Amino acid sequence: MFRDNLVQMRKLRRLTQEDIAEKVGVTRQAVAKWEAGETVPDLDKCKMLAEILGVSLDDLANYEPDKNLGLGVPPKGKHLFGVVTVGDKGQIVIPAKARKLFDISPGDQMVILGDETQGLALIKSENFLTLADLIRKGIKE
């Protein structure tokens, strides 16, 4: 996983092995060994790689495209939780991993935002109201 993710992310960002080596402070040969699966960088170097590539350390090390619709590692802070089906009355089930990450519990109220070119977004109503209040205060000042 790590080596495949490293190669994919490096190429996606149009970086060479030499570019990565220079940024991390190792030789190009070290990067080549990481990508071949012959060695694995230490934790500090892995953290640097994740930062350079703009992904989480966990995703760099553990992300499995086969379990994520065949898609590559998402940018840090971005998630693909899977596919949901819209029910007869428009209801959807938010995947458990998303509910846990965003602390969504039964009974929580959500605001649904829409942009005709971007799609829909969900935000907890308390967070939305806090943001709206900050905007309102900013306008008054």
Image (spheres, rainbow, N blue to C red):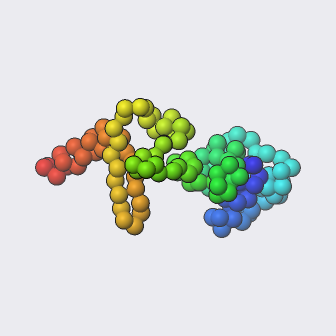
Horizontal side, residue 3 vs residue 99: left or right: right
Query: Whole-percent x and y of residue 4?
Result: 75, 55
Q: Residue furthest left?
A: 140
- Count of marks, rendered view: 0
Q: Is any atom of residue 43 visible in this view?
A: yes
**Is 45 rendered above or below residue 10?**
above
Q: Nearer the viewer, residue 54 or 75?
A: 75
| Residue drawn at point x = 84 percent, y = 55 percent | 36
**Is 6 rendered above or below residue 47?**
below
Query: Whole-percent x and y of residue 75?
Result: 56, 54
Q: Residue furthest right?
A: 38
Query: Whole-percent x and y of residue 121?
Result: 40, 52
Horizontal side, residue 141 vs residue 120: left or right: left
| Residue drawn at point x = 68 percent, y = 41 percent | 44
| Residue drawn at point x = 30 percent, y = 37 percent | 126
Q: Nearer the viewer, residue 21 or 135?
A: 135
Q: Residue furthest front?
A: 88
Q: Nearer the viewer, residue 65 or 135?
A: 65
Give the quarter of the image for residue 14.
Answer: bottom right
Q: Is any atom of residue 51 visible in this view?
A: no
Query: Whole-percent x and y of residue 74?
Result: 59, 54
| Residue drawn at point x = 35 percent, y = 42 percent | 110
Q: Nearer the viewer, residue 107 or 59?
A: 107
Horizontal side, residue 112 vs residue 24: left or right: left
**Is 17 rendered above or below residue 103?**
below
